[in-house]
């Protein structure tokens, strides 16, 4: 995928206010591009999304799985990617799950009930506290579109055992970036119990549910979580870390998975 489909240049005016004058500079600047895609399941248009135009298959697989519409990749019989639409043919039993979708208006994202979500993420893997900051460093080191435009969210899968980033995803939305990361892992049979999901964006409860569905034990964010996200992380035994920047971070749940914080109790 060429970067011209992900971002492009336009002429803009950059303005700076000084004490007694207004300074303007006419320049070419990079801006991210939007791509509208419809997901059509067995002839039913389930949802339209505005995403970045790459890793479409990963997005569809990750989105359907993390929402609970599919529970096994074998339920997907065919994926055909067309212009602004993806036609998905699935096992007919999947259609009964579509009616259970609810929409969270604040993000335009969809999740379903937690009925099929594992109650506890059972991974016993340990992450060193220094790896938390290393994961964030590698996230932004690999984010070329963010560096050029500042207009995307970034997500990655970070291998705990290898202390390295497996994939970096950049997308217009924080949810679709995470969906693409999950889809990338599913299509490659990644052992999610040994990785962290790392994100530049805020963490809401639906993102925690996405991680719980594939049993990812760590969520690391540069930004803030919501109150409900912390409660969900504690419910599903996910180690949730926020405000990871510089040489510090906050731990909101399950600190025992972090080497150096095994004895920390949150009350």
Image (spheres, rainbow, N blue to C red):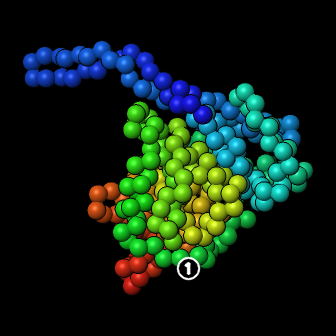
To which quarter of the image does residue 132 belong?
bottom left
Q: Position of residue 195 (x, y in %)?
A: 55, 65
- On screen, residue 85 versus residue 59, left or right, reads right
Q: Quadrant of the N terminus?
A: top right
Question: What residue is drawn where x is 71% and y is 49%?
Answer: 61
Neighbor class of circle 1 (other Cα within 10 Å; few <14, some 14-19, many 20+) is: few
**Residue 185 in the image: above or below residue 13:** below
Give the tally of numbered discs: 1
Question: What residue is drawn where x is 59% and y is 41%?
Answer: 108
**Residue 185 in the image: above or below residue 215:** above
Question: What residue is drawn where x is 25% and y is 20%?
Answer: 15
What residue sits right under mark 1 in the picture?
124
Q: Position of residue 110 (x, y in %)?
A: 65, 47
Q: Nearer the viewer, residue 168 or 24?
A: 168
The local secondary structure at tag 1 comes to: loop
Q: Is residue 242 visible?
A: no
Q: Position of residue 56 (x, y in %)?
A: 67, 40
Q: Residue pushed farthest bottom?
A: 263
Q: Quadrant of the C terminus?
A: bottom left
To which quarter of the image does residue 13 belong?
top left
Q: Nearer the viewer, residue 167 or 210?
A: 167
Q: Is residue 208 visible?
A: yes
Q: Nearer the viewer, residue 166 or 174?
A: 166
Question: What residue is drawn where x is 76% and y is 53%?
Answer: 69
């Amino acid at each position: 995928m060429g970067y011209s489909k992900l971002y492009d240049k336009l002429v803009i005016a950059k303005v700076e206010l000084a004490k007694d004058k207004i300074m303007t500079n006419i320049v070419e600047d990079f801006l991210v591009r939007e791509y509208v895609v419809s997901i059509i399941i067995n002839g039913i248009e389930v949802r339209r999304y505005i995403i970045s135009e790459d890793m479409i298959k990963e997005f569809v697989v990750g989105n359907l799985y993390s929402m609970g519409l599919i529970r096994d990749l074998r339920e997907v019989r065919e994926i055909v990617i067309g212009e602004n639409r993806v036609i998905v043919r699935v096992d007919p039993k999947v259609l009964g799950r579509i009616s259970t979708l609810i929409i969270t208006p604040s993000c335009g994202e969809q999740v379903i009930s937690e009925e099929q979500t594992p109650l506890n993420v059972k991974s016993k893997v340990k992450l060193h506290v220094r790896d938390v900051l290393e994961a964030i460093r590698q996230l932004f080191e690999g984010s070329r579109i963010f560096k050029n435009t500042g207009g995307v969210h970034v997500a990655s899968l970070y291998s705990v055992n290898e202390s390295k980033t497996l994939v970096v995803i950049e997308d217009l939305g924080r949810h679709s970036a995470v969906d693409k990361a999950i889809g990338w892992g599913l299509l490659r049979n990644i052992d999610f119990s040994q990785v962290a999901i790392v994100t530049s964006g805020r963490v809401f409860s639906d993102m925690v549910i996405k991680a719980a569905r594939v049993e990812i034990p760590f969520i690391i964010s540069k930004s803030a979580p919501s109150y409900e996200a912390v409660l969900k992380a504690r419910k599903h035994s996910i180690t949730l870390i926020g405000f990871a920047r510089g040489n510090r971070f906050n731990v909101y749940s399950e600190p025992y998975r972090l080497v150096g914080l095994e004895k920390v109790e949150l009350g």
